[in-house]
Each structure stands twice: as structure tokens, then as C-alpha cells.
Amino acid sequence: MNQKCNRTLTAPWLFTRSQVKLINKFRMLWEQHDVWTRSAIMSIVFELPDLDLVLQRLLRNPVDFARVFEIFYGPKIAARFKELLREHLVLAAQIVEAAKAGNVKAEAEAKRKWFKNADKIAAFLSQINPFWPEQKWREMLHEHLRLVYKEAVNILTADYEAGIEVYDRIEKQTLEMADFMSKGIFRQFPCLFLI
């Protein structure tokens, strides 16, 4: 439901303080998503002693996202998004673990579920915000999965230079998702961002 309010900006490219705050929050959350996903891949591949701690921190990301979602959509919707994002992260770890073990069947099954989960996230987001088209989210999330999978393969095959290059692409792409998320909320709730 789109709110009606008298919002006038002197220039369409200016942002209010509240908009900048939300932009920064989503950018930080997506950056943390990237960083801790990469850390988890490294810890799994190299069997680092910090694996449990890294996975705990990675799984805090859906909780942090849910806190922001709850402001706009309430606890039930926030909890559902948290659940879907947690599933996304758990499946990513399962893919890396299966690939490291050479279990092609388990890797393929986890990967199939991973893309199905992305489709669920895209559908869910489009249901709660009319400015978040399902097809656009599906495209962005599928690209994210392809890049993260490529990153994991590069680390597993010791192609570290390519792994760094793909991480740069992941970071750029997730910041685009962060900004898309913010813009959709600005459009859905314009009265909340007047100052």
C-alpha cells in the first residue's frame, strides 16, 4: 500500500537524512553478507579453526536484515525473510562442503535447492512491495548465486586471483541489490522519508 503525502524535493537526486540512513544500512548488511559468505567459504575449504564462529556470524546476517524489515513490514514478514535468507546461507555452505568432499550428487541437489530458494525470496519480496518486481529480484538473485558459486570454485581450485576478481563483482552486484531494496522502500513508504 502506497502512502500519500506531500513530498517535494528541490531536486530529484537529493536524498533526505532518513533515506541516506536506510541506504547505508542496507549497503552495510549486503556487504556483511558478502564478507561473511567469503569467510565461510575460506573456513570450510581450508578447515580453519574459526569455522563455527564464522558460521555463527554469517547466520546473524538474516537476523540483522529482519530487524530492518520489521520496521516497515512487521514481525511476521520480517521473520519469514529471516527464514528464507538463513536457508540461502545454509544451502551455500552445504554446496561448498559437498564440492570439497567431491560429492557431486549432494552438490547438485543443494545447488538446485539454492536456486529454488532464490525464486522463493524473489516471489516473497514482490508480494510485500509493489516496487520490487519478482522478475527483477529473480535475475539479481540468480546472478548473485552464479557469482558466489564461481567464487567458491575459484577458492576450491586455488585460482585465488580469479577468486578476488569475482569477489569484486559480487560486491558491486550486491550493492546494486541494496540500493534497489532501499529505493523500493522509499517508493512504498514516501511519508517515512521526508526528513
Image (cartoon, rainbow, N blue to C red):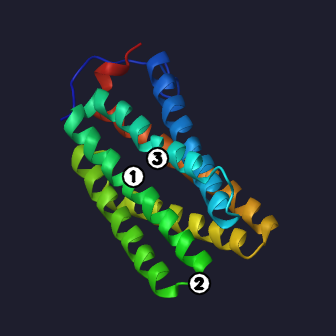
Is 57 or 187 nearer to us in this picture?
57
* Element under disc 1: helix
Question: Whole-Å distance between the Cαs marked 2 and 1?
Answer: 24 Å
Say which residue label 3 marks: 59
**In terms of secondary structure, where does tag 2 sit?**
loop
Do the numbered discs 2 and 1 sit on residues whose CB atoms are within 8 Å? no
Q: Can you tell which of label 2 and label 1 is closer to the viewer?
A: 2
Please give the name of the residue rendered at 36% of the width and 31% of the height, measured from the top-left corner.
67
Q: Counting residues from the N terminus, which is met first, the one under dot 3 or under dot 2?
A: 3
Q: Amino acid at mark 2?
A: Gly
Task: Name the quarter where the C terminus is drawn.
Answer: top left
Q: Residues within 10 Å of mark 2 (few under 14, many from 20)?
A: few
Residue 195 visible at all: yes
- Check if mark 3's residue and mark 1's residue have beta carbons within 8 Å: yes
Q: Which amino acid, by three-letter code, is at mark 3?
A: Leu
Taking the image as drawn, is residue 175 in sight? no
Q: On residue 86, which mark appears?
A: 1
Residue 57 percent coordinates (x, y): 53, 42
Measure how far apart labels 3 and 1 are at the Cα level: 6 Å
Q: State the residue position of label 2.
A: 102
Residue at x 32% of width, y 54% of height: 133
Query: Which residue is rendered at x = 76% and y = 68% of the image?
Result: 162
Q: Quadrant of the N terminus?
A: top left
Q: Nearer the viewer, residue 167 or 102?
A: 102
Image location of residue 80, percent across then percent down = 26, 47
Above-or-below relation of 173 to 32: below
Circle 3 packing at 10 Å, graded few (<14), some (14-19), many (20+), is many
- On screen, residue 80 versus residue 92, left or right, reads left
Mark-to-mark CA distance, 3 and 2: 25 Å
